Amino acid sequence: MPGITLVALLLAAVASVGIAVYGVRLARTTSDFLVASRSVGAGWNAAAISGEYLSAASFLGVAGLIAKYGADALWYPVGFTAGYLGLLLFVAAPLRRSGAYTVPDFAEFRLGSLRLRRLAALTVVLICAVYLIPQFQGAGLTLRILLGVPGWVGAVAVGAIVIGTVANGGMRSITFVQAFQYWLKLTAVALPALVLAAHFLRGDRVFDTTELSAAGADWLLPGGGLGGPHPMFQVYSLIAATFLCTMGLPHVLVRFYTNPDGRAARSTAVTVIGLVGLFYLFPTLLGVFARLYVPGLVSADKSDTAVLLLPGSVLTGLPGQLLGALVAAGAIVAFLSTSSGLLVSIAGVVSTDILRGRIRDFRVAALVPGAVPLGLSFAVASLDLSRTVGLAFAVAASTLCPLLVLGIWWRGLTARGAAAGLLAGGLTAGTATVVSVSGGVPAHLAGGWLTAVLSYPAAVSVPLSFLTMIVVSRLSSGQPAREVGRIFVRMHAPEGLGLGADREPGLRQP
């Protein structure tokens, strides 16, 4: 099996690099590198967004958590998908009409504060860096399980491909790559799920509550939580993080700047809902089959490996090996696609907010910030992939989501209020993330509310961020009413009125 798996992994990597090289030939200007010259259609963009959004947590982690925790873990795929509905309703079109390129660019456009722009830039870099760490960890885990190589090999291999691709081709290049990677990931998760479903039905087996429960646990029933104290708090916090994070993920938001106009941004969001919803049907099935066929992996706390080893555990001979190799290829492109999107977001912010915004600056910004999370992935504690990603999502939901929602829809938001909310939500969720990835709560403090909040902080940090922005804005002075009115007309007026003319990426608002 290692031989077939190695061939599949190499083919997936070579195909991704080959498409990236083709894209490099089309990337000539700074605008190509940063926003693909704002010329990506809704269909291509939706596939690319789905490709980078469906990360290792989606491909491996969701199925593993469903196998491990049952009904409550279904909130992961439901929240990941439903988040795009909020993005469609509240953010996508106004954000695109603003003419901004990055979230920091939008912050200065909306509130006229250079300090707020810098704080938003720091927030973007931190979110993307935290999100990159589990991608590299997952790559190392995958190659270690499948090929028996040391964990650092997979992390370094994925890191090298991602940094090279982004530095040489930017957004123009990875758009083609990520669209291809979505369809490969969908095939790699759908085909094994459908084959295992046919195998299950052909065996004349029926779902049995006893089989699907371990040690008497009510796996099929909601309310058990995700391990640890205060299970219902965990569930509600997970819902808040997954439903709101999409409106604060920099690598998703930057994609809407590549659409030609607000109408295309809305169409992109609608298409993404369909593509992501279709994908998540299959990890759910695989999670159920993992509970049935490889319960030993679940009980041994190796739920992330369940999807990788499931086909070979159920089907003997060449069919099982081929399906296992396909799953492995899908897992690798999951790491590649999400890491590429995150690194483009970091490089775009660093090159335009710290450096001078040239192509050379973009490449430098891709090299250094890409290497730091790679190094951290060897040092921090390894959690379930979806758990680690969930922490990054909690930070995004607690910072950039309130900034964008209130900035787009509430005229009363001020620069001081936005900065206070970013700090309050970011420090709360960020502290929880640092504690979790550095080893967790000390033993003498574990087991109570502190453990629950630090493991799932969004239920506290998201309301705190919104409330802080509102209260501090009420107590501070903002922009003149006429200026705010002009900004709101630009964001909310229909296309064709000439009120949202695009600026060159990297140029700051006067």
Image: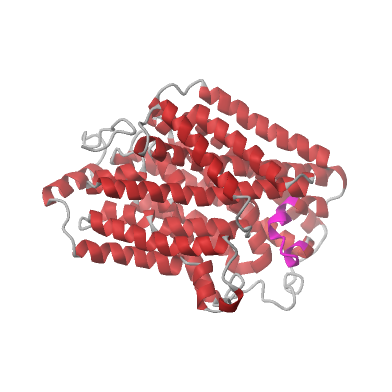
Query: In which quadrant of the rendered view does residue 108 lie?
Result: top left
Left or right of 391: which side holds 292? right
Please say whether residue 194 is visible from this viewpoint: no
Is 440 rendered above or below residue 104? below
Estimate the x, y position of residue 415 in percent, counting from the top left.
24, 54
Is 92 rendered above or below residue 29? below
The residue segment tinted magenta is 297-308
Query: In which quadrant of the rendered view does residue 15 lie?
Result: top right
Please say whether residue 170 is visible from this viewpoint: yes
Estimate the x, y position of residue 356 in percent, counting from the top left.
35, 31
Estimate the x, y position of residue 244 in percent, counting from the top left.
42, 58
Q: Nearer the viewer, residue 311 or 160?
A: 160
307 within the magenta span = yes
Q: Nearer the viewer, residue 143 or 25?
A: 143
Estimate the x, y position of residue 485 in percent, counting from the top left.
16, 48
Residue ID at (71%, 64%): 301
User: Which quarter shows the N terminus?
Assistant: top right
